[in-house]
Image (cartoon, rainbow, N blue to C red):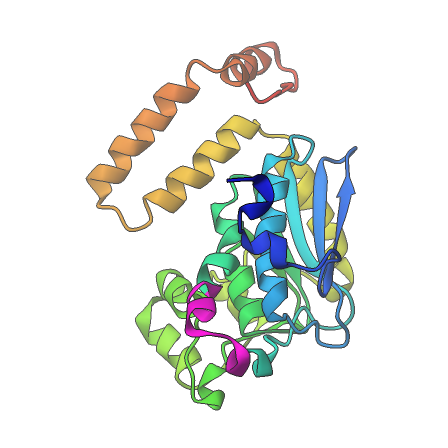
Amino acid sequence: MRLHDLRHPALTLAAAFDGYRVEIDPVRQRADLVLCRPPFNVISMPQREQLRITFEALEADEAVRVIVVRAEGEHFSGGSDIRGFLQATPEHVSRLAWNVAAPARCSKPVVTAARGYCFGVGFELSLACDFRLVTPTTLYALPEQKLGQIPGSGGSARLQKMVGITRTKDIVMRSRRIPGPQAANWGVASACVPDRELEAATDALVDELRRFSPLAQRAAKKLLNDTEDSPLSIAIELEGHCYSRLRSSDDFRNGVEAFQDKRKPNFVGT
């Protein structure tokens, strides 16, 4: 078999990003995925696959420590390109949740900053991220019931883990819109900040995350994701194994010595 005989979804994608762009700041070790299909930043079917592949590429980029998902304009995303669902095959639709879960699988911290509409797949993409920053203008919603459908990219499942079955039924079965302050009170959003401060709050969170050990960040994210459904005894056992592995890292030694010397540590990720 020759290389060009191989088939992969990446080979069928357009050369240009569909509905978003990627900005990399090597000085701040930060990559931004910016949704840019105004006015509602609708997410197309091809875009979902591109986003997954982009996350996988950023995962492999050692210059990137933190990833931010944000959007141009007044709204994060109004959701999917509805017509795309009618044109997609059942096999294609079955992969949607895998594509949207790319931020969760990524070992690096992923922050999403949303104002305005954050509906459907836009909300599901946010739920797959590690930190969600919102403003009073933000509206979270899973409106699929209005189309005779249910969320198909992990939205109801992730939400139920966060807020329980009663609130999830209220949001999903009634297509309710949840404002940013309420989302923060319920623990769906990490923080709700004034609209004019969203970018500054995002910058501050990125800089804070960059100060920690890359090894410890990866270990914490994987441990928390892997033990979300585990019994307490299993979670504690896995936590102990992760702790013991980090015990022999250069970053841990650096952190202990910096604490003793009353200086800032210089974590390098080894």
User: Taking 251 as reference, is 199 above or below it?
Assistant: below
Foreground residue among 240 and 25: 25
Could you tell me residue 211's position as x and y percent?
A: 64, 30
The number of callouts visible is 0
Foreground residue among 70 and 115: 70
Q: Main SS of the magenta segment?
A: helix
- In this orientation, does residue 164 appear? yes
Could you tell me residue 5's position as x and y percent?
A: 55, 47
**Which quadrant would residue 267 be assigned to in this image?**
top right
Does the stretch in magenta take in 95?
yes
Foreground residue among 70 and 137: 70
**Which quadrant would residue 38 be assigned to in this image?**
bottom right
**Left/right of residue 161 with respect to residue 16 in the rendered view:** left
Magenta-colored span:
85-96
The residue furthest front is 1
Q: Residue at x 57, y 82 (%)?
A: 82
Q: Residue at x 65, y 18 (%)?
A: 266
User: Taking 53 as reference, is 155 above or below it?
Assistant: below
Q: Residue at x 54, y 51 (%)?
A: 8
**Left/right of residue 165 with respect to residue 56 in the rendered view:** left
Could you tell me residue 245's position as x and y percent?
A: 38, 20
Q: Quadrant of the C terminus?
A: top right
- In this orientation, does residue 177 appear? no
Does the stretch in magenta take in 87?
yes
